[in-house]
Image (cartoon, grey):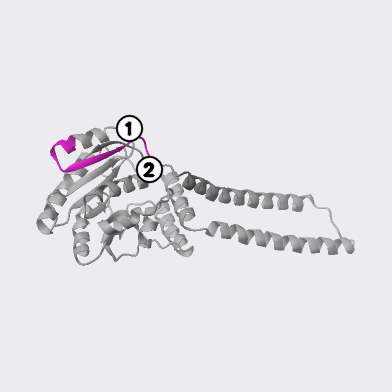
């Protein structure tokens, strides 16, 4: 008998959480009848510093239903909420499923994930097979993002977010990664355990607002790039070498024109050179600063999150 815990990160999800809890409980009860699952299988909801009634809803559900809850002292971010949920669940569960509270990812597919697990897979990834509900910009930028990361050596599964099933062994292996700059969907393929995929159709939110607006999505994408690759630093090196080569060419050109008496005093070319090189220098410093900032956060070893309350 395997105990299953469904981990649900939640931030200001009072509009959808009651429906989400009831739906996940019904699904889990059906799964207990179909698969050799422990009847004590449950749901663990991580309140990521919500300012609405999310925690009160969790407490009410905990009184009468197989629902546990973690409450952060403040907002620590979606990725840290997932880590906290997986770490807590792994203490008692044999299987952990992570899914967002809005249930845009199809929870009915958990049954297929369990089937793959009992056939030998230790990690089962939920992969979207549609982007019809996304706007053109989001759909296009996401495709280019996956291509870019694969180009610089980060092996992501396209259209996979944070809907997945993991065995306890896989969860413990993942938790051994201690970096603070988390990009979970990039770390999972590094584990190396037997992995399967389950495809599903994503649906619109029932209520509430997305917790990943454009600015947050771009920041998340940048974190993914800088957490897994030094390609931006290599690009700086390339442009630095190119600028140095052009500088030598221009030096030789200036010397030759001086010797030939063909020098022309040009203000425009001088200003363009200053602005272009100045811009490259500032961009380079910014990228290097990003990496230095991440190193600073890592060496401080601050806790990823602080738990204010735990409902077992």
Spot occupied by residue 278 in the image (x, y as percentages of width and height):
67, 49
Q: Quadrant of the C terminus?
A: top left
Q: Nearer the viewer, residue 129 or 186?
A: 186
Q: Nearer the viewer, residue 290 or 259?
A: 290
Residue found 22% across the figure and 63% down from its top: 117
Is residue 100 visible in this depiction of the protein?
no
**Front position among marks 1 and 2:** 2
Quarter holding residue 2 = bottom left
Badge 1 vs badge 2, beta-carbon distance below 8 Å: no
- Residue shown at 43%/45% (left/top)? 216
Under circle 2, the secondary element is loop
Placement of the N terminus among the 4 image quadrants = bottom left
Q: Identify whether 222 is placed above or below 305.
A: below
Tell me which label, 1 or 2, sits earlier in the chain. Answer: 1
Would you place residue 118 above or below residue 138 in this image? below
Q: Residues within 10 Å of mark 2 (few under 14, many from 20)?
A: some
Q: How many marks?
A: 2
- Tell me which segment is drawn in magenta: 60-75
Taking the image as shown, residue 124 lies to the left or right of residue 249, namely: left
Relative to 9, 150 lies left or right: right
State whether residue 251 appears in this view: yes
Which of the 4 quarters of the picture holds residue 118?
Answer: bottom left
- Whether residue 116 sits left or right of residue 223 in the image: it is left
Question: Measured from the top left, where is residue 37 in percent x and y?
Answer: 14, 56
Residue with the mark numbered 1: 51
Q: Residue at x 72, y 50 (%)?
A: 274
What is the number of the mark on residue 77? 2
């Amino acid at each position: 008998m395997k105990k299953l815990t469904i981990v649900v990160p939640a931030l200001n999800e009072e509009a959808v959480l009651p429906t989400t809890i009831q739906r996940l409980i019904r699904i889990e009860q059906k799964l207990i009848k179909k698969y050799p699952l422990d009847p004590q299988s449950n749901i663990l909801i991580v309140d990521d510093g919500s300012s609405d009634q999310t925690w009160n809803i969790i407490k009410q559900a905990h009184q009468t239903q197989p629902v546990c809850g973690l409450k952060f002292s403040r907002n620590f971010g979606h990725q840290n909420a997932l880590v906290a949920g997986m770490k807590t669940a792994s203490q008692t569960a044999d299987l952990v499923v992570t899914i967002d509270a809005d249930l845009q990812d199809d929870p009915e597919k958990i049954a297929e994930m369990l089937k793959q697990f009992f056939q030998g897979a230790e990690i089962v990834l939920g992969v979207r097979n549609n982007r019809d509900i996304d706007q053109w910009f989001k759909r296009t930028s996401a495709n280019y993002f996956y291509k870019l990361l694969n180009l610089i050596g980060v092996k992501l599964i396209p259209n996979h977010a944070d809907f997945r099933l993991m065995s306890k062994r896989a969860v413990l292996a993942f938790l051994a990664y201690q970096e603070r700059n988390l990009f979970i969907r990039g770390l999972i393929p590094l584990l190396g355990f037997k992995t399967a995929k389950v495809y599903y159709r994503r649906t619109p939110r029932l209520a509430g607002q997305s917790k990943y607006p454009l600015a947050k999505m771009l920041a998340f994408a940048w974190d993914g790039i800088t957490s897994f690759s030094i390609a931006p630093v290599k690009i700086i090196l390339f442009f630095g070498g190119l600028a140095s080569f052009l500088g030598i060419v221009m030096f030789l050109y200036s010397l030759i024109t001086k010797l030939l008496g063909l020098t022309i005093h040009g203000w425009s070319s001088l200003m363009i050179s200053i602005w272009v090189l100045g811009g490259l220098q500032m961009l380079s410093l910014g990228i290097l600063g990003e990496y230095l900032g991440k190193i600073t956060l890592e060496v401080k070893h601050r806790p990823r999150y602080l738990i204010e309350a735990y409902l077992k």
